[in-house]
Image (tube, rainbow, N blue to C red):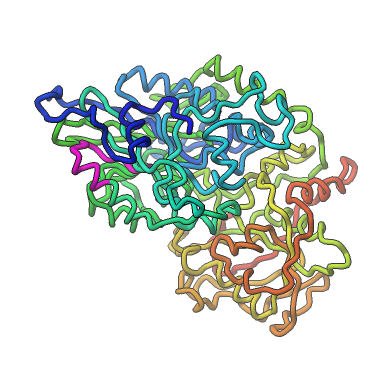
């Protein structure tokens, strides 16, 4: 285990399996009794975006015109480093923490190094402790443990694909926490559950964990069990309080969202999501740093008084949490703000905000990884006649999971085209989370563009579903967790769900007024008579079997709550990886004959317009 940057008390925790260390002060009289100000600098869902994402923009309130919203470009590890340095300069009693998904689903600059690039850079920025997220498990527990503890990746080229710096990789300079992740081989947590940090005589106890549904959100959770979040947190929080630890902070890879139109709207309009029932069930907790839903918020929970935060995604935002803690008693005050990572690529910035300068050391580090993969990433794979943007939730940069994306249609078409002719595949489907970005300009499309869109390395499968099962699968788009996860109100209509992205060989209509969000198995939104299958648009036969191409996340695991996939028959690995399918598909479109934009496959006459 890599113990760099772990406090003395944290080391005692790991070695002794306890929540406190014998070196801790035995009474309040031994402490500085004056309240201590502590700063917690929080991030989540970085996903290896060492360079700014092409789509990374935030909406800020313009102080000179309250009715106007200003859009700014944000992100990039060198700018995060500068912001973290600025914040630490405000208060030496600081710690940088994370809520998971720093790696996994990463762009090529990170993924080509097996994400060692991100692990190195985040450690150098000052990340000290982080919860694991679902994507940390994408390559399995053995690889995640290697990222923590160090060593070169087996089967990879040393100096180019692994162990980039001096042919070595020392592992993370920060500590992963996994309080609810049990290794089935040892019956112990995969990583430590807790971490304690002392500041001038006051102690903060951190509990780190991921969502219990992680096995449904990644293909790499084999050999692991995931326990209930509330039970695990309350157990450790009670132990912390019994030992006199003054503040308890939860780092959890689970989240929610609001309908706020601008950054740092602490009125938290429409706050909802899977994190809320967890927060409502907690005791002895002061702050919850969350993630997973790629949203930004700073909210005070009215039921519990817990401060709940999330910092957007891809390093676009950092949360500045400030606690006032009285030794021997606890938290007197807690406040937070979401700070945009405004880079120097903006021509104009609203008054009251300042562009950051790139940290030179981190910029050099990122350039090293950039250069390693640049040649392969720059190769042109094809051309498009029109942009294929990722649709975002209005007023945010978060992907809208409730709609059909042009890019999603193209990926589905690429899936279908990759199936061997003898398979006689009928349609292809993918989850909206499989659309990680879009292409905002017509013209040349590079390997880097495609890898940013499909960075998962998922194998493609086909599986046979009856027409009746297909309808049941489509209804799952708006049922259960898929409807509660990221609700959205548009023009007075309640929208929700995860819309499967279809190939051109599947078209249908649905009706939002029939009641999205019904309990599992009771959906009736799909207008069955409108479903058409195949290149000739034949009516759906409920008894006929149809061959569906999809990714391993859906086919093998029924991921994102699409459980019907696991009821299918004839499951077959096609031996094709998603990125390879994309490359082959785009190769068909040279500059002289660029890919035309796809036609819409899903109609909803009663839905608000999102496009």
Left or right position of 125 against 195: right
Residue farthest to the right, as pictured: 592
Seen in the picture, residue 419 relative to 260 is either above or below; the reply is below
In the rendered image, which quarter is residue 308 located in? top left
Left or right position of 104 against 280: right
Residue farthest to the left, as pictured: 29
In the rendered image, which quarter is residue 244 located in? top left
Residue 155, position as x, y percentages in the image? 73, 37
The foreground one among 573 and 494 is 573
Give the position of the C terminus as an image quadrant: bottom right
Residue occupying image coordinates x 51% and y 42%: 101
Residue 548, position as x, y percentages in the image? 73, 68
The foreground one among 14 and 539 is 14
Residue occupying image coordinates x 77% and y 55%: 414
Residue 451, position as x, y percentages in the image? 70, 41
Inspect the magenta stretch and tell me whether residue 239 lies in it: yes
Report the number of numbered marks. Answer: 0
Residue 331, position as x, y percentages in the image? 19, 36
Residue occupying image coordinates x 82% and y 50%: 585
Inspect the magenta stretch and tell me whether residue 480 lies in it: no
Seen in the picture, residue 135 relative to 344 is either above or below; the reply is below
Left or right position of 302 against 547: left
Residue farthest to the top, as pictured: 360
In the rendered image, which quarter is residue 113 located in? top right
Q: Can see residue 58?
A: yes
Seen in the picture, residue 450 relative to 328 is either above or below; the reply is below
Range shown magenta? 237-251
Q: Can see residue 486?
A: no
């Amino acid at each position: 285990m890599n113990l760099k940057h772990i406090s003395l008390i944290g080391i005692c925790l790991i070695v002794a399996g306890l929540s406190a260390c014998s070196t801790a002060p035995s009474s309040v009289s031994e402490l500085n009794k004056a309240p201590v100000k502590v700063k917690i600098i929080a991030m989540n869902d970085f996903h290896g975006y060492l360079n700014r994402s092409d789509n990374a923009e935030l909406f800020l309130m313009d102080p000179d015109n309250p009715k106007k919203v200003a859009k700014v470009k944000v992100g990039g590890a060198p700018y995060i480093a500068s912001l973290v340095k600025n914040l630490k300069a405000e208060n030496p009693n600081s710690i940088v923490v994370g809520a998971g998904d720093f790696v996994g689903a990463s762009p090529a600059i990170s993924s080509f190094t097996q994400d060692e690039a991100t692990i190195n850079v985040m450690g150098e920025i000052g990340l000290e402790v982080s919860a694991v997220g679902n994507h940390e498990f994408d390559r399995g527990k053995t690889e995640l443990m290697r990222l923590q503890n160090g060593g070169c990746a087996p089967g990879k080229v040393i100096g180019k694909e692994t162990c980039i710096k001096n042919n070595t990789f020392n592992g993370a300079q920060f500590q992963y926490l996994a309080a609810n992740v049990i290794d089935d081989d040892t019956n112990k947590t995969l990583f430590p559950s807790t971490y304690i940090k002392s500041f001038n005589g006051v102690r903060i106890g951190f509990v780190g964990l991921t969502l219990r549904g992680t096995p449904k959100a990644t293909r790499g959770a084999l050999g692991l069990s995931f326990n209930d979040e509330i039970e695990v947190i309350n157990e450790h929080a009670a132990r912390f309080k019994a030992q006199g630890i003054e503040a308890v902070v939860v780092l959890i890879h689970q989240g929610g969202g609001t309908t706020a139109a601008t950054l740092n709207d602490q009125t938290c309009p429409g706050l909802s999501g899977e994190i809320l029932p967890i927060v409502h069930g907690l005791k002895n907790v002061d702050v919850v740093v969350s993630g997973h839903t790629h949203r930004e918020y700073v909210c005070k929970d009215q039921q519990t008084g817990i401060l709940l935060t999330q910092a957007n995604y891809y390093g676009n935002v950092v949360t500045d949490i400030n606690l006032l803690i009285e030794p021997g008693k606890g938290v007197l005050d807690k406040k937070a703000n979401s700070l945009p990572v405004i880079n120097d690529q903006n021509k104009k910035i609203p008054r009251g905000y300042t562009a950051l300068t790139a940290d030179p050391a981190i910029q050099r580090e990122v350039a090293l990884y950039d250069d390693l993969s640049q040649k392969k990433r720059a190769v042109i794979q094809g051309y498009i006649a029109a942009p294929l943007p990722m649709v975002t939730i209005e007023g945010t940069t978060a992907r809208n999971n409730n709609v059909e994306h042009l890019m999603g249609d193209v990926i589905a078409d690429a899936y279908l085209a990759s199936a061997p002719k003898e398979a006689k595949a009928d349609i292809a489907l993918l989850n909206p989370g499989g659309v990680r970005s879009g292409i905002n300009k017509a013209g040349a499309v590079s390997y880097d563009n495609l890898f940013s869109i499909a960075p998962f390395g998922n194998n493609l499968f086909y599986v046979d579903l009856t027409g009746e099962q297909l309808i049941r699968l489509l209804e799952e788009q708006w049922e259960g967790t898929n409807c509660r996860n990221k609700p959205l109100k548009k023009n007075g209509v309640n929208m929700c769900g995860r819309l499967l992205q279809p190939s051109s060989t599947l078209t249908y209509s649905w009706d939002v007024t029939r009641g999205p969000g019904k309990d599992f198995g009771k959906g009736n939104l799909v207008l069955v008579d409108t479903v058409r299958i195949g290149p000739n648009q034949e009516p759906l036969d409920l008894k006929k079997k149809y061959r569906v191409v999809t990714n391993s996340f859906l086919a093998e695991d029924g991921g994102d709550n699409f459980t019907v996939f696991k009821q299918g028959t004839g499951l077959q690995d096609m031996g094709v990886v998603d990125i390879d399918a994309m490359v082959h598909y785009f190769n068909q479109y040279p500059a002289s004959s660029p890919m035309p934009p796809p036609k819409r496959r899903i109609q909803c006459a009663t839905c608000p317009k999102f496009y």
